[in-house]
Amino acid sequence: MLNELLSAAERAEACSVIQSTFLTAIWETLYVTIIATFFAVLIGLPLGVILVIGEKDGIRPLPAWLMRLLNFIINVLRSIPFLILMILIFPFTRLIMGTVVGTRASIVPLVMAAFPFVARITESSLREVDAGSIEMARSMGSSTWQIITRVLIPESVPSLIANVTLTLTNILGYSAMSGIIGGGGLGKIAINYGYYRYKYLVMFCAVILLILMVQAFQSAGTALARRCDKRLR
């Protein structure tokens, strides 16, 4: 059916584009996704911990105004659609990245979009930890840092891995959207060739590759989470 819709010249041109650009695009997509996920976790994980231990009845209560401010910032950033967020923080992106454009410039909006999500899923994972384990650690004189590093995080590792995998796949989808503002990777190819030039075979191949990458990340993350789950041993 596809062969009937495409002429020989169109198929040849699509194959040429795929051969010349797809390897670089795959690398750019992986690079941006992994780097953005790393920084999103680096920012979001501590925020999620603070949201749990800093609440009124938490391990180390923090001022109410500070907790309200953190929740407000996280909720606001989470509620802004990614495409709009990219445009809103474009001046900030230029401030951080300088004159860098293209693939690396998309890292900043990806991190800004993802770290509030990481904070919330971290908060959700930590709240699943048995309160009895926390109270036992407190009764034994453990410090706040010891409770975090020896109870909260170790007990929630399977859930955290599963949620970080979810973040990774979301960022992969966001990275494809960043092609609209000049970000590189498979998203740029799909938009430039599939949308602007009506080269639907190129766009179809780019989408298939994105789906395969999501499946690979999700399968690896799920397997790792199951392996770290003590309940399944």
Image (cartoon, grey):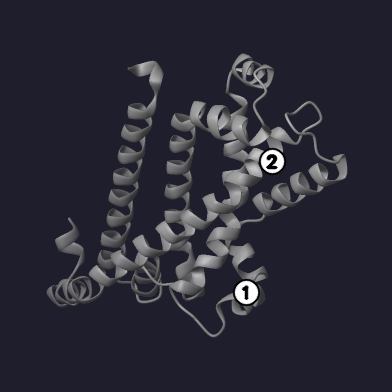
Q: Amino acid at mark 2?
A: Ile
**Side of 18 where 163 appears, left or right:** right
Q: Which mark is residue 50?
A: 2
Image-quadrant location for residue 137: top right
Q: Residue at x 21, y 72 (%)?
A: 14
Q: CB atoms at circles 2 and 1 under 8 Å apart?
A: no
Query: Mark 1 — residue?
Result: 90
**Quarter of the rendering occupied by the C terminus:** top left
> Residue 213 at what x, y percent from top left?
31, 51
Residue closer to the observer: 56 or 4: 56
The residue most toward the bottom is 99
**Quarter of the rendering occupied by the N terminus:** bottom left
**Side of 85 where 215 appears, left or right:** left
Q: Secondary structure at mark 1?
A: helix
Q: Amino acid at mark 1?
A: Phe
Q: Secondary structure at mark 2?
A: helix
The residue most toward the front is 141
